[in-house]
Amino acid sequence: MLIRKPSDILPSEITPEATYRDRRTFLAAAGGLLAAAALPLKAKGAQGSGANLGPLQKSPLSTSETPNTYAQVTQYNNFYEFGTGKDDPAREAWRLKPRPWEVKVTGLCAKPRTFGIEELLKLAPLEERIYRMRCVEGWSMVIPWVGFPIKALLDKVQPLGSARFVAFFSADRPDQMPGVRLPVLDWPYLEGLRLDEANHPLAILAVGLYGQILPNQNGAPIRLVAPWKYGFKGGKSIVEIRLVKDQPWTSWAKANPNEYGFYANVNPNHDHPRWSQKTERRIGELLRRPTQMFNGYGDQVAHLYRGMDLDTYF
């Protein structure tokens, strides 16, 4: 038997098409494996998820589609800081200590500062945002996030005129995140948006799910959500937000620029080099459905990319 060391594994080998078409994924889509595992994993992995966030505004930006179940949303995740398997985060994320937590906002802004997580929870009215979410691997969910617009945070620090991009740095804690001990990516995880994307009303910092504090495996205590983009854009467990002039060299674009572009807009017309993006499978369903341009949010975000070749800027 040939045993490969982590250092032998290329980033491009981590999420092949077969991964989401295998038997485990089929069972997950049918709900069997997830439902069976939900209770024991929730008790260990979803630290703090029982805490209610109180009265929430219902956002008019929410989709009317039925959300996936709590078990599906919290037991089937990509969060490589805890491992590359879909069930690794729910099994391993209990190690993360999301309190106390601070987020530094630095770079090209007039008033850089550090926010405690409790301060961020009160920064703006928390809203429930039910969003369609699409993964680059071909699966999707509908998730009832709780959060606030990124713009509310950026307004506090007053970006300078020279700021054009926003970089989001995730935590890098080997003692709490076993995945970062492996050279799968260049840690810490880094994602980014153009400043106008970050200021868009759909772009939020999520602090909860289903009205409760965000579970560890979903990016506790605070993560990025931009629903018109593929899921890997959503950096989790954020510790720093930096306003910069130049486009950040984000983690997946750095690891494999031919497969994972900076923009990562959901686009059925730009296939991943190893599989089509024209269809997707909603977790909990057996049949595939057509992928919508910008994940169905085109009427709200298409103007951000007017004049751009989205096959080049993918």
Image (cartoon, rainbow, N blue to C red):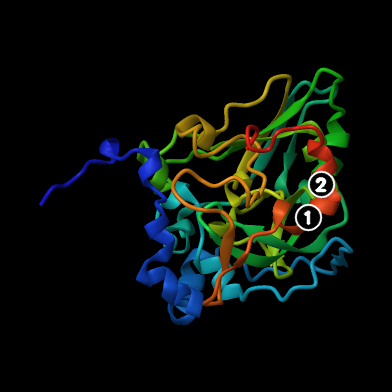
Instruction: Residue 211 in the image: state x and y as whole percent.
Output: 74, 69
| Disc 1/disc 2 C-alpha distance (Å) | 6 Å
Q: Residue at x 57, y 55 (%)?
A: 135
Q: Amino acid at mark 2?
A: Val
Is residue 24 visible to the viewer in this orientation of the structure?
yes
Query: Image height check: is 214 above or below 261?
Result: below
Seen as rendered, the residue at the extreme left is: 1
Query: Image height check: is 194 above or below 237?
Result: above
Is residue 35 visible to the viewer in this orientation of the structure?
no
Residue contact at pointers 1 and 2, CB within 8 angstroms: yes
Judged from the image, the secondary structure of the residue bearing numbered disc 2 is helix
Judged from the image, the secondary structure of the residue bearing numbered disc 1 is loop
Q: Amino acid at mark 1?
A: Tyr
Can you tell which quarter of the image residue 62 is in? bottom right
Q: Residue at x 51, y 37 (%)?
A: 252
Q: Residue at x 56, y 70 (%)?
A: 288
Query: Which residue is disc 1 drawn over?
Result: 297
Query: Image height check: is 32 above or below 1?
Result: below
Query: Image height check: is 308 above or below 218?
Result: above
50 displayed left or right of 151: left
Query: Which residue is disc 2 drawn over?
Result: 301
The image's mark for residue 15 is: none
194 or 50, nearer to the observer: 194
309 or 284, nearer to the observer: 309
167 displayed left or right of 128: left
